[in-house]
Image (cartoon, rainbow, N blue to C red):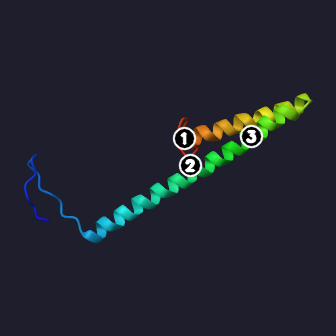
């Protein structure tokens, strides 16, 4: 790599192979952790929705129905956060 002029008039930046490797490795690790976190959150969301739906189908009282409905809503909220449909708590 040299300092050949670029079409916009600037020069190409020299990047050390080790620096490039470190940047790419960090980016890949972050991306994989994001995927694992998203899958884990979706798994928890599915667990809450399934438990709540089962409770809605099996419960006879209003208290059980309210708790089951809350579980379903919580499951959908977790799934929405996992899929970035709503802002996360950290922001």
- Residue 67 visible somewhere in the drawing: no
Q: Residue at x 89, y 33 (%)?
A: 59
Marks 1/2 in contact by CB < 8 Å: the verdict is: yes
Crowding at mark 1 (Cα within 10 Å: few <14, some 14-19, many 20+): some
- Tell me how far mark 3 sits from mark 1, CA to CA: 18 Å
Q: CA distance from mark 1 to mark 2?
A: 7 Å
From the viewer's perspective, is 13 left or right of 4?
A: right
Quarter residue 53 falls in? top right
Q: Position of residue 23 (x, y in %)?
A: 35, 63
**Mark nearer the viewer, 2 or 3:** 3
The spot of residue 38 in percent (x, y) is: 56, 49
Q: At numbered mark 1, what does the secondary structure look like: helix, strand or loop?
A: loop
Marks 2 and 3, the one that precedes in the sequence: 2
Q: Is residue 78 above or below residue 30?
A: above
Q: Tag on residue 83?
A: 1
Q: Earlier in the sequence, mark 3 or mark 1?
A: 3
Q: Does residue 45 show up?
A: yes
Q: CA distance from mark 2 to mark 3?
A: 18 Å
Q: Which residue is mark 3?
A: 50
**Secondary element at tag 3:** helix
Q: Secondary structure at mark 2?
A: helix
Q: Which residue is mark 2?
A: 38
Horizontal side of residue 60 vs 72, given as left or right: right
Vertical side of 24 occupied by 66: above or below: above
Mark 3 or 1, closer to the camera = 3
Tag shown at residue 36: none
Dot 1 or dot 2, earlier in sequence: 2
- Mark 3 closeness class: few <14, some 14–19, many ≥20 residues within 10 Å: some
- Residue 88 at x, y percent in the picture: 56, 42
Identify the residue shown where x is 74% and y is 40%: 50
Which of the two residues, 89 or 5, is positioned nearer the viewer here? 5
């Amino acid at each position: 790599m040299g300092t050949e002029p670029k079409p916009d008039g600037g020069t190409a930046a020299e990047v050390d192979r080790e620096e490039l490797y470190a940047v790419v490795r960090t980016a890949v690790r972050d991306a994989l952790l994001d995927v694992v976190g998203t899958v884990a959150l979706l798994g928890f969301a599915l667990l809450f929705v399934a438990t709540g739906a089962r409770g809605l189908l099996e419960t006879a009282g209003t208290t059980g129905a309210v708790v089951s409905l809350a579980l379903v809503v919580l499951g959908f909220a977790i799934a929405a956060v996992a899929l970035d449909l709503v802002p996360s708590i950290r922001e």
